[in-house]
Amino acid sequence: MNPATPDPIVVWSQFFHPALMWLLFALTIYALYLGLKVRRVRSAEGEEKKELIKGKFNDKHFQIGSLVLALMVVGSIGGMVVTYLNNGKLFVGSHLLAGLGMTGMIAVSASLSPLMQKGVDWARSTHILLNVVLLGLFGWQAWTGIEIVLRIISKL
């Protein structure tokens, strides 16, 4: 292999993080949808409530939320590892700092689950607030991530 030609593994490894994050963004939106359904079950009455309970939205929300938490942590670490391996350094900027903040936020949000299961209202409100902010940051991260991917592609 020509030393001037980049190793295909190095080239393709740079796209693992963005691909995973776009999947994660979609899963996060789905988790929001399920969370809204859970709130609707809580406020429903009578036949509507019986029908909504059949959807098992609470269980699905918890399962998808757990998956989102795991993928966010792994994806954040993976993005930093690949960046470091390919460049010998991390680029400390708004994309990295917001991503680290999001990873912390999702951990705090998930840690509120036991309190929410006990019906603690402030925990539920905090969980919702953290996740709304997280989703907004995620949208911004997706945009800045596209810019980073375009820079990587332009150097290939």
Image (cartoon, grey):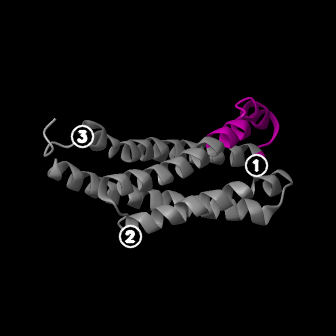
Q: Which residue is found at the position 86% from the left and 54% from the top?
A: 118
Q: Nearer the viewer, residue 154 or 144?
A: 154
- Nearest to the eye among marks 2 and 1: give it: 2
State the predominant SS element of the stretch in magenta.
helix
Q: Quadrant of the N terminus?
A: top left
At mark 2, the secondary structure is loop
In the rendering, which numbered label is found on residue 92? 2
Q: Nearer the viewer, residue 94 or 39?
A: 94
- Residue type at mark 2: give it: Val
Is mark 2 in CB contact (under 8 Å) with mark 3?
A: no
Q: Nearer the viewer, residue 92 or 8?
A: 8
- Nearest to the eye among marks 1 and 3: give it: 3
Is mark 1 in CB contact (under 8 Å) with mark 3?
A: no
Q: Which residues are magenta?
A: 42-64
Residue 32 in the magenta stretch? The answer is: no
Is mark 2 in CB contact (under 8 Å) with mark 1?
A: no
Task: Estimate the x, y position of residue 35 in percent, counting from the top left.
Answer: 65, 47
Residue 143 located left or right of residue 50: left
- Using the rendered view, name the quadrant where residue 87 is placed: bottom left
Q: Which residue is mark 3?
A: 7
Q: Earlier in the sequence, mark 1 or mark 3?
A: 3
Q: CA distance from mark 2 to mark 3?
A: 25 Å
- Residue type at mark 1: give it: Ser
